[in-house]
């Protein structure tokens, strides 16, 4: 191993130890708090006692939906496609705003009334249907395991490409750290480490942009070179190669569709007060736009300092995932390289930690407590449960989180083809399942269980069918038509089905008068 | 007006619910406005031959307007909307029913 690799790895090891120490410190504090109060474990472990302030809320939201692809895959595509890929990534500028502006306060109020700590808890309170709850929980666990595996894989491969060591070592380094602090620290450890990881991501963005502009001799000189190397770099359609309907599809997948992702929606249940929410909207908008702009623009500028011949290719097609690692190795000294690589690894860890705690909540809270141990767990009033039971649930929750983490870890070492296959549908599948039940449930009185069940089945089935068969309507990606199917079937089935009872409607829509 | 332990005013259930709907509607309007800006500055101005592009700070005009100005503008709009339209209120308590945990 070269000196360069040793220094780079040392920087990463120090950063991981810091994450681990910080995560465990938060979890110790949390456990002391649990012991002092002697109750409310579920509320603390899965939603952090609804105590997030503005900065933490903003950073955890961003860190959760910013994945390895924003640092590696995305800039790589921007390298070959040009500004169209920055243009596309900027679709995400208003996402923090709509997630928090549309879901934030409504979820905050409802979750306090119903003691909800997961999106599925909310679905249970709104639709009172075991089919919806069990379907949602199973979909969530499956899709999340697939997504966690692909995040781990992305981080581990990156580790391998910059250090030359087998990716197993990288996986052991950050994988174990994130699994352990999430299991013992719960939601509180997840969101506080997310905050630190989010700050590291911003620093990483600065580092890569500054490096490229510096070695490229300033923006004007970079632009001159780009005009020679890739004349289409400056157009919004890559000179016709990146079609408009394809780009527009992302307004659904990473635009409005994100309102249907449980991992971002659940953040609406965890903040302290309206002031925190307002601050988070502003911080979140500024940071997410900055990250998207700077990372993808770095990719666009990269051809000026990195020739295509320096990037590995298969059958004549550039493997653009190597653009960022190659840049790092070519131009950064090992300390700076370590600091930069910490950013994509942070993106991996913050995404995995959030998915892991929710997958655990789906099994412990949404399935076990609601259906298997429901006699002991008087739903909605955990205070009533005795201390012994509370302790048992505590141990069980941590064990379940650890076990899911371990399963994902093993899957990453030897990815089963079924999970790889499921991952193709993970993000779109989650959106097709959850978008309509969440949004219509919050803002449309006629939304009901029939609508939810029919729409989840039709939406997900359409999405999987279109993706597998490669069907495209008017050049859009399958998510657009599938979400349309989910919406239409939701509305029709809700109008046909039995409406929710008066008690539920009064709880969810106190502003209107109710007549039977 | 009374306020809760976080210093946020306590509203009635109805007032609170109406405010939430209003904020959600304004969020959608802002979202649509950003979409229109993004679409028309991007596809609208970027259609011609790259040789005829006007450049600002090294970047094509369409990109500068849709992505740089669009981003900064959206941040400024967020601050204004949050300060002017979004209101603080208690999430725990309401003026007509006490603690909503019950």
Image (cartoon, helix red, strand yellow):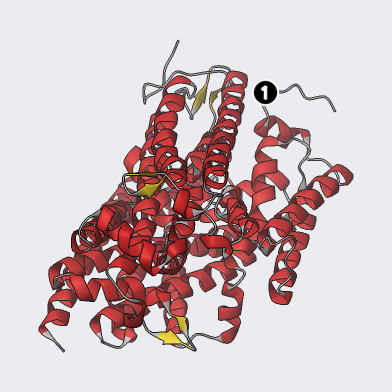
Q: Is residue A15 above or below residue A61?
A: below
Res. A137 visible in picture: no
| Image: A507 above or below A439 | above
Q: Is residue A203 above or below residue A512?
A: below
Q: Nearer the viewer, residue A399 or A141?
A: A141
Rendered location of residue B51, percent (x, y): 45, 53
Q: Give the chain of mark 1.
A: A
Residue A337 position by quadrant: bottom left
Residues A378 and A195: in front is A195
Q: Would residue A104 be visible to someone looking at this image?
A: yes
The quarter of the picture where residue A398 lies is bottom left
Write down the residue under mark 1: A511
Q: How far across and how far down the image is residue A45, in percent?
A: 41, 54
Q: Quadrant of the C terminus of chain A?
A: top right
Q: Are there few (<14), some (14-19), or many (20+) residues within 10 Å of tag 1?
A: some
> Which residue lies at the image location 53% right of the left edge and 67% below the top edge?
A144
Residue A428 image offset from top left, x and y in percent: 62, 62
At x 45% / y 75%, what residue is drawn? Answer: A403
Identify which residue is drawn at 74% across, 71% down.
A465
- Residue extending furthest top? B1
Q: Secondary structure at mark 1?
A: loop
Which quadrant would the N terminus of chain A be assigned to in this image?
bottom left
Residue A302: x and y in percent read 32, 66
Residue drawn 39% across the image and 58% down it: A296
**In screen coordinates, is A18 left or right of B4?**
left
From the viewer's side, name the closer residue of A271 and B5: A271
Q: In the picture provided, is A139 more to the left or to the right than B11?
A: right
Q: Is residue B81 above or below residue A71?
A: above
């Amino acid at each position: 191993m070269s000196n360069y690799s040793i220094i780079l790895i040392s920087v990463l090891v120090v950063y991981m130890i810091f994450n681990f120490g910080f995560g465990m410190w938060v979890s110790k504090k949390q456990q002391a708090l649990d012991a002092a109060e002697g109750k409310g474990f579920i509320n603390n472990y899965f939603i952090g006692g609804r105590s997030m302030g503005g900065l933490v809320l903003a950073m955890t939201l961003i860190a959760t939906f910013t994945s390895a692809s924003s640092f590696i895959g995305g800039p790589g595509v921007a390298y070959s496609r040009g500004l169209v890929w920055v243009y596309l990534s900027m679709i995400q500028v208003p996402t923090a705003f709509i997630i928090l502006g549309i879901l934030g306060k409504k979820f905050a109020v409802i979750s306090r009334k119903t003691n909800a700590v997961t999106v599925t808890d909310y679905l249970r309170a709104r639709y009172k249907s075991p089919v919806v709850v069990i379907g949602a929980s199973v979909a969530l666990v499956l899709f999340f395991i697939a997504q966690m595996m692909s995040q781990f894989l992305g981080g581990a491969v990156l580790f391998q490409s910059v250090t030359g060591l087998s990716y197993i070592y990288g996986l052991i380094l950050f994988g174990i750290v994130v699994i352990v602090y999430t299991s013992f620290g719960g939601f509180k450890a997840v969101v506080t480490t997310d905050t630190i990881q989010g700050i590291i991501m911003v620093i990483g963005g600065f580092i890569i942009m500054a490096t490229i502009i510096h070695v490229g001799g300033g923006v004007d000189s970079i632009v001159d070179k780009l005009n020679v190397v890739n004349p289409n770099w400056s157009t919004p359609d890559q000179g016709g190669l990146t079609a408009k309907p394809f780009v527009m599809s992302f307004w659904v997948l990473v635009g409005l569709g994100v309102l249907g992702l449980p991992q971002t929606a659940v953040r609406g249940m965890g903040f302290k007060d309206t002031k925190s929410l307002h601050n988070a909207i502003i911080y979140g908008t500024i940071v997410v736009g900055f990250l998207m702009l700077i990372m993808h623009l770095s990719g666009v500028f990269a051809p000026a300092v990195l020739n295509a011949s320096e990037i590995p290719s298969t059958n004549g097609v550039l493997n653009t995932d190597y653009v960022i690692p190659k840049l790092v190795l070519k131009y950064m000294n090992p300390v700076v390289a370590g600091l930069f690589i910490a950013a994509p690894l942070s993106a991996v860890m913050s995404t995995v930690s959030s998915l892991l705690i929710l997958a655990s909540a789906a099994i412990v809270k949404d399935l076990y407590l609601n259906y298997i141990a429901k006699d002991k767990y008087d739903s909605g009033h955990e205070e009533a449960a005795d201390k012994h039971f509370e302790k048992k649930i505590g141990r069980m929750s941590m064990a379940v989180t650890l076990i899911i983490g371990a399963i994902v870890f093993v899957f990453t070492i030897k990815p089963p083809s079924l999970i790889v296959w499921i991952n193709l549908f993970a993000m779109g599948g989650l959106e097709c399942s959850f978008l309509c039940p969440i949004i219509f449930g919050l803002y449309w009185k006629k939304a009901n269980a029939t609508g939810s069940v029919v729409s989840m089945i039709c939406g997900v089935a359409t999405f999987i069918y279109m993706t597998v068969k490669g069907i495209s309507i008017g050049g859009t990606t399958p998510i657009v038509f599938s979400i349309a199917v989910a919406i239409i079937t939701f509305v029709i089935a809700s109008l046909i089905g039995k409406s929710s009872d008066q008690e539920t409607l009064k709880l969810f829509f106190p502003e209107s008068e109710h007549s039977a | 007006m009374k306020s809760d332990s976080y210093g946020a005013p306590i509203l009635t259930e109805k007032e609170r619910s109406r405010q939430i709907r209003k904020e959600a509607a304004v969020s959608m309007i802002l979202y649509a406005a950003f979409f229109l800006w993004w679409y028309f500055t991007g596809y609208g101005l970027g259609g011609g031959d790259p040789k005829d592009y006007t450049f600002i700070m090294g970047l094509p005009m369409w990109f500068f307007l849709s992505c740089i100005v669009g981003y900064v503008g959206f941040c400024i709009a967020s601050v204004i909307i949050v300060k002017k339209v979004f209101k603080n209120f208690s999430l725990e308590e309401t003026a007509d029913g006490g603690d909503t945990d019950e």
